[in-house]
Structures are given as structure tokens and as C-alpha cells.
Amino acid sequence: MSDNNDLFAATMAAIGFVPPALLDGNPGPEALRNADRTSRYWSSPHVGELHLGSPAHLREICRMFRETFNPYRPAVIAWPELTPDMLQRVTSLPIWDIAVHTEGRARLRFASYAANLKSAEVRDALMLNAWEEHRHKEVLSKLVKAYGITLGPEPAYQVPRDPEWMYLVTGYSECIDSFFAFGLFELARRSGFFPVELVETFEPVMQEECRHILLFANLVAGQRASLSWWRRIVFELRVTAAWFYIAWERLVLARSMKANGMGTGQDSNFTMTSAQAVTSIEIGFRDLMTLCLQENDRRFSGYDARLVRPKAIPALAKIALFLTRPWAKKRRGDTEPLETAGGRGSSTQL
Ligand SMILES: [Fe+2]
Ligand SMILES: [Fe+2]
């Protein structure tokens, strides 16, 4: 495990990246609230349009990432005490190993891509992104320790041979995972299935993933806009291949989970299985997709509207909702859990 951490530390050192300063040992609630607010709301001082791929666009997207950094410190998180029931729910969630491995891989992939970039500004933004993935891993390691969750052995993370390819695969994977995680997280918050203090502990992590995919969507859009037509074709082929690769990876993961008695062996059903693991309320596919879309919009709403948002997964969710309209009618008259379960509407919790 330490070898894995060493590899990431070595990549950081080779680039000369210095980890950012964090909040002091015991920040008060006001300092935490301010840090949270800073991470959610950001407007560029740039006047006029931000043309994709222009120096101003690149500069501002990197500035957004820098200025919305949340300096929380994983080591001081006070893990709430859980009732035996809640502890059982937390420890039996089938996500901890996958979550730790995903963060461990992502940090090295982002760092390796960053190391090869010419633009110091973009390199620093992506290194900070990588460092935040490392911090997510640290948060998870503190959680599993606090609640006595046993993890399997960690794989040996590899420095990618083709950093751009792995950057695309990791970035698009985050776009998928974050979209569903936003909805599942809100579902967990509303359900009261877990203590609110525990859910809130992960709030900065969730918002960070939102910033990560905002950065990714803008860097990819900027790259697209600045390529010559033939380079653009090559790039689009790579992007398409990345989506196929992700689909294949998820199929393999779903099959292995099915073999281990987790989920049903289908990725969409894995999301539904996860929904049932975070709430006692019965929730249908359409309700969950609606919640994911609402949360996706809410989390991005505080950032400058001139920055592009990830579009593919929300668009697919909208298509799925459109195609399943006949089933919506069947639900009318039933309890509508999402509309009555204490949603926070469009406001935030600040
Ligand atoms: Fe992460
Ligand atoms: Fe991320």
C-alpha cells in the first residue's frame, strides 16, 4: 500500500507540485462554512464571452479550480458514533473497496497526464485535482478505520503508458459516477438511513467531484475547439474508444460483483441496488433519475455560466426519462417519495 502512495508522491515531486495549505487543526463552524461556500460559488472576473479553447477560457477554468479549493483536513474529521443498525448498514455497503481503488488509480492517472503538459497553469490545476483524489482516498481510509471495515488488498496502481488515454477514460468515468453519486448521496441524506453528520462529512468530497468534472468538461471542450480538423477526428475517435472501454470495464465489474453475490450483474441495476442500500424508502428508476438530474443542476449552479458543463450523462438520463414516460402514469396515485421526503429544492445547505 505504501508503495502505491510512494508512486504518487514521486510523481508529485517530479513535477515540483507543492500540496496546498489546509485549515488549522481545529477550525470552527464558521471557517468550515466559509470554505464550503467558496468551493460552490465562483464567477470569473473576465468581461465578455469565454470562447472555448481561448487563452482566456483556459486561464479562467484553471482559476476557477484554484479559487474554489476547499482546504479541509481529513485527519480532523470527527466520525460520528453509529448505532449498531447504522454501523451494520455502513459496513455492509458494497462500495468501500471499489471507492478506495478508484481514488488510488485516479490520482496517479491525473498526475501522470499533468506531468506531460506544457501549460504550467493547466498542469497545476490537474495536479491539484490529482492531489484531491489522494485526499479522498485518505478520507476513505480514515472512515474504514473508524468503523472497523475490512478492505481487501489494494491493487498495484500503474503509471499509465498512454497518459492522455487514461485521462480521458478517468475523466469520463468520473462524469458517469458523479452524476449517479449526486442523486444517491441526496437520497441517503433525505432517507435518514445514516446519521446526518456522516452524510455531511462527504459533502466536500461530492462537491469536489463536481469541480473535477467541470474542469474536465472544459479542458476537453477547449482541446476540441483548438484542434485542426484532422487532429480533431483522431481525438474524437479516442473519445469514442474511451466510452466503449468504460462500458466494457463496467460490464466486467458488474459480472465480478454478480459472481461475488453483489448486485444483479447489470450496471443500471447496480445503481438501483445502491439506491436500495442507502434508503428504506422504495424508489423507482424514474424517481432516481429525476433526483440525479436535479442534484446535478444544483451542484453546478453556483459556477460561472460561461463554463461548459458535462452533457452526455444528463442527456442520456433525460432520454431514459422520456422513453419511460408510460411507466410514470402507473406510479401516479402511489406515494411520491421524492416530493415528500424533505427535499431541499434549489437552495443549498449553507
Ligand atoms: Fe475522487
Ligand atoms: Fe475526482
Image: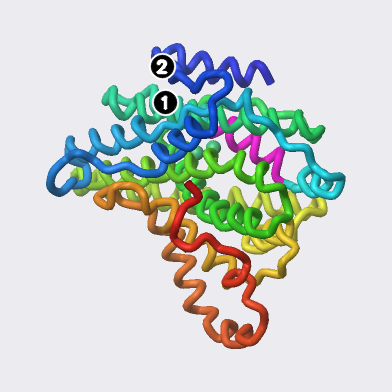
**Three-letter amino acid code at the position of disc 2:** Phe
Q: Where is residue 13 in the image (x, y as percent from the top left)?
A: 46, 12
Vertical side of 71 occupied by 310: above or below: below
Asked where in the image residue 340 lies, by quadrant, the reply is bottom right
Residue for point 62% across, 76% down: 336
- The three-letter code of the residue at mark 1 reads Met
Separation (CA) of disc 1 from disc 2: 7 Å
Relative depth, front residue between 229 and 199: 199
Q: Give the range drawn in magenta.
A: 95-106
The reply to whether the residue tagged 2 has its Cβ within 8 angstroms of ligand 2 is no
Question: Label 2 crowding class (10 Å Cα cut-off): few <14, some 14-19, many 20+?
Answer: some
Location of mark 1 (residue): 127
Secondary structure type for disc 1:
helix
**Is 155 covered by the magenta stretch?**
no
Query: Is any atom of residue 109 visible in this view?
Result: no
* Residue 310 as seen in the image, left or right of residue 207: left
Can residue 147 be seen? yes
In this figure, what is the number of numbered marks? 2
Residue 315: give x, y in percent of width and height. Answer: 42, 65
Q: Is the magenta stretch mostly helix, strand or loop?
A: helix
Tell which of 43 and 96 is nearer to you.
Answer: 43
Work out whether 109 lies above or below 220.
above
Element carrying mark 2: loop
Residue 46's image quarter? top left
Q: Which of disc 2 and disc 1 is earlier in sequence?
A: 2
Q: Residue 17 carries which label?
A: 2
Mark 1 in CB contact with mark 2 (< 8 angstroms): yes
> Residue at (28%, 47%) from the top-left corner?
304
**The furthest residue to the right:** 84
- Quadrant containing ligand 1 reads top right
Q: Is residue 18 above or below residue 306?
A: above
